């Protein structure tokens, strides 16, 4: 075999353009899904407990802050409890958005601040807040992995009422 045939055999052909843009399906084994669900649930419960621990202090500062902490703790509890069982795609999306929103809210209130009068005053950074935010950030990653591993529901392209509208449009065009 000479050098030219060796070079011809080693030339790589490019992959079709359609395959590069598609996201790969993530297939996690059942044991890994269970472990991810349990770790995600424990992180949500940890965040819930931290928010409940800080709840009385927030009520003393301002009643609305206490309500916000209560709603966050309730949402984390619901997400954590549902992760212990077979969560659906919508619930994973809900948990993903809630945890991401909480992380963004924490970063905003501790860097830019909370509106007090006409000025924004940043809140002090404490270990409890950092711990809850790290737990929520890890929960975002786990929920994203679980959501990507879940198969999508194929819906029909034809919605209710479209057939009727199409026949009415066809009648008008005749």
Image (tube, rainbow, N blue to C red):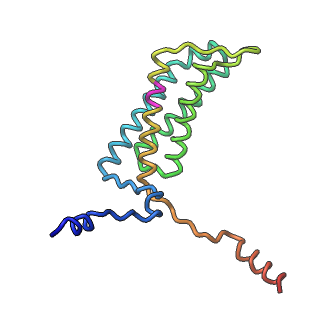
Apparent side of residue 88 relative to residue 32 in the rendered image (left or right): right
Q: Is residue 25 above or below residue 47?
A: below
Q: Quadrant of the C terminus?
A: bottom right
Expressed as whole percent of the image width and height from the top left, the position of residue 108 reads 60, 24
> What secondary structure predominates along the stretch shown in magenta?
helix
Residue shown at 63% from the left, 20% from the top = 112
Apparent side of residue 26 relative to residue 99 in the rendered image (left or right): left
**Which residue extends farthest left?**
1
Residue shown at 50% from the left, 52% from the top = 89
Expressed as whole percent of the image width and height from the top left, the position of residue 27 reads 35, 55
Task: Indicate the quadrant where residue 119 lies.
Answer: top right
Q: Give the range drawn in magenta.
A: 132-136
Expressed as whole percent of the image width and height from the top left, the position of residue 137 reads 46, 32
Task: Indicate the quadrant where residue 64 lies.
Answer: top right
Q: Quadrant of the N terminus?
A: bottom left
Q: Which of 73 and 149 is in front in this view?
A: 149
Q: Number of labelled discs?
A: 0
Expressed as whole percent of the image width and height from the top left, the position of residue 107 reads 56, 24
Q: Does the magenta stretch include residue 109?
A: no
Residue shown at 31% from the left, 53% from the top = 29
Q: Is residue 134 magenta?
A: yes
Q: Is residue 61 above or below residue 132?
A: above
Residue shown at 44% from the left, 58% from the top = 20
Q: Is residue 64 above or below residue 43?
A: above
């Amino acid at each position: 075999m000479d050098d030219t045939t060796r070079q011809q055999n080693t030339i790589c052909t490019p992959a079709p353009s359609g395959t590069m843009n598609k996201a790969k399906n993530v297939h996690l084994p059942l044991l890994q899904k269970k472990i991810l669900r349990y770790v995600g649930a424990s992180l949500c419960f940890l965040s819930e407990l931290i928010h409940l621990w800080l709840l009385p202090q927030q009520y003393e500062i301002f009643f609305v802050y206490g309500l916000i902490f209560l709603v966050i703790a309730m949402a984390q509890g619901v997400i954590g409890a549902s992760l212990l069982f077979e969560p659906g795609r919508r619930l994973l999306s809900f948990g993903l958005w809630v945890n991401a929103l909480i992380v963004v809210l924490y970063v905003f209130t501790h860097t830019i601040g909370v509106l007090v009068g006409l000025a924004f005053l940043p809140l002090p950074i404490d270990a409890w807040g950092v711990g809850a935010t790290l737990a929520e950030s890890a929960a975002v990653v786990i929920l994203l992995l679980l959501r990507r591993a879940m198969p999508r529901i194929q819906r029909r392209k034809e919605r209710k009422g479209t057939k009727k509208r199409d026949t009415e449009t066809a009648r008008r065009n005749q």
